[in-house]
Amino acid sequence: MKTFSATPADIDKKWILIDAEGVVLGRLASIVAMRLRGKHKASFTPNMDMGDNVIIINADKVQMTGKKRDDKKYYWHTGHPGGIKHRTARQILEGDYPERVVTKAVQRMLPGNRLSRQQMTNLRVYAGAEHPHEAQSPEVLDVKSMNSKNTRSA
């Protein structure tokens, strides 16, 4: 047996469309991170960008379990002394850029290296139901039907 190692000629990227409405954030991010890395493929090679292009719509309608919507905080630092700031998940989801919650969740499920930063460019997240990628004819991936725990009625 020889170990298979993919070359750039072996890579076959697809376009996948995921509707995030009513889906639990962590479960969605886990599935998307796996698709971006290409771990769902039998020809997975850890040092190659083998993943698919993923489009997520309705990111503003994503669900969170427990009290995470009010208790989960996103921190950043201004660079000045004492300049740590935070916003709750509710504030971000109700703000101008609700897609950032989904983007951060997926980013934090990928390893922190150059390859994962390259793989993050294959992710497109939109707050509403519209997206400009109809020409790529993406396949719809129904995350809700994969597992009953993927959805939450709130």
Image (tube, rainbow, N blue to C red):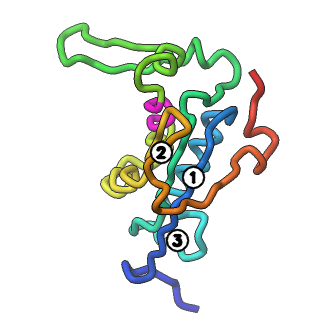
Q: Residue at x 75, y 29 (%)?
A: 152
Which mark is in front, 3 or 1?
1
Q: Is residue 73 left or right of residue 21?
A: left
Which mark is in front, 1 or 2?
2
Label 2 belongs to which residue? 131
Density class for disc 1 (Cα within 10 Å; few <14, some 14-19, many ≥20) is: many
Label pair 1/2, CB-CB below 8 angstroms = yes
State the CA–CA distance, disc 3 to disc 2: 29 Å
Q: Quadrant of the N terminus?
A: bottom right
Residue reaching furthest to the right: 148
Q: Quadrant of the C terminus?
A: top right
Q: Amino acid at mark 1?
A: Leu
Q: Amino acid at mark 3?
A: Phe
Q: Nearer the viewer, residue 77 or 94?
A: 94
Nearest to N terminus: mark 3 or mark 2 = 3
Q: Is residue 94 left or right of residue 114?
A: right
Depicted 122 relative to depicted 82: above or below: below
Residue reaching furthest to the top: 82
Label 1 belongs to which residue? 17
Residue 3, horizontal then vertical, whole percent:
52, 84
State the CA–CA distance, disc 1 to disc 2: 10 Å
Residue 36 is covered by the magenta coloring: no
Q: How many marks?
A: 3
Residue 132, horizontal then vertical, whole percent:
43, 49
- What number is the disc on residue 34? none
Q: Which residues are magenta?
A: 99-104
Depicted 42 relative to depicted 23: above or below: below
Nearest to N terminus: mark 3 or mark 1 = 1
Q: Amino acid at mark 2?
A: His
Q: Is residue 83 left or right of residue 34?
A: left
Label 3 belongs to which residue? 44
